[in-house]
Image: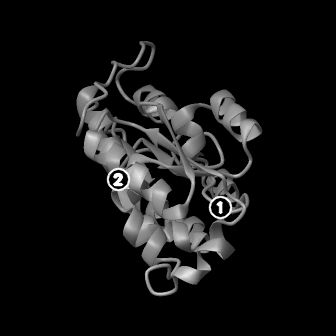
Amino acid sequence: MGATQGIEASGNGRTLVVACGALARELLHVVEANGLDRIDVECLPASYHNEPDRIPPAVADRVRAAVGRYDRIFVGYADCGTGGRLDAVCEELGVERLPGAHCYEFFSGGADFAQLQEAELGTFYLTDFLARHFDRLVIEALWLDTHPELLADYFGNYTRLVYLSQVDDADLEARARVAAERLGLTFEMHRTGYGDLETSIVALGDGIGREPLVVSIGAL
């Protein structure tokens, strides 16, 4: 995982992760739990997921602004609905990103996520972040608070809600169950931990060559 192509690294041994704000809590926990004190995390607004066209240029601007201050720069996003445009930015700038099409995939792992999708295509996914902010990011963003008649238009083809939980938190589980009920979907829960997010971030730091520490699956 290299620094930006054609630009001299800083030589200070530090790494920057330019990440989605929806991953801020998890990223900071991974960094702290694994003692990765030479990794810095800078997050862009999580709301960009509602406007994925904003993600590639925003990432490019943040990466370019960091050049010369870091030896390595890593992008803490999956594709996140950019249709390959984020990959094009990463290739142009010579940086790598998290694996997968979206955070559901790198939390659960590619193989497990494929099985979930194959089992039921009509699946709506929640992570801890989405469970925590469900009202704002789903109900209010889709105008379901003021126009509940739109529920069938948005979710008529869904049959279940799968909660991919990163931590063991009874309150978040309860929120996810309420979310499923509000959407009229059956509820299913899978405890994933941090998955490929932790593996990728640990590989950036001083822990290269060893297994990542097991981050406690407890409330942050």
Question: Which of the marked residues, 2 or 1, is nearer the chain's N terminus?
Answer: 1
Amino acid type of the residue that numbered disc 2 sits on in the rendered structure: Arg
At which x and y percent is residue 49? 53, 66
Residue at (56% x, 74% y) in the render: 51
The image quadrant that residue 45 belongs to is bottom left
Residue that badge 2 annotates: 175
Q: CA distance from mark 2 to mark 1?
A: 25 Å
Seen from the viewer's position, the closer of residues 159 and 96 is 159
At which x and y percent is residue 121? 74, 47
Quadrant into which the N terminus falls? top right
Q: Residues within 10 Å of mark 1 (few under 14, many from 20)?
A: some
| Foreground disc of the pair 2, 1 | 2
Image: 104 above or below 84: above
At which x and y percent is residue 70? 38, 46
Amino acid type of the residue that numbered disc 1 sits on in the rendered structure: Gly
Q: Give the number of the disc on residue 81.
A: 1
Asked whether, in this view, residue 66 is left or right of residue 81, the answer is left
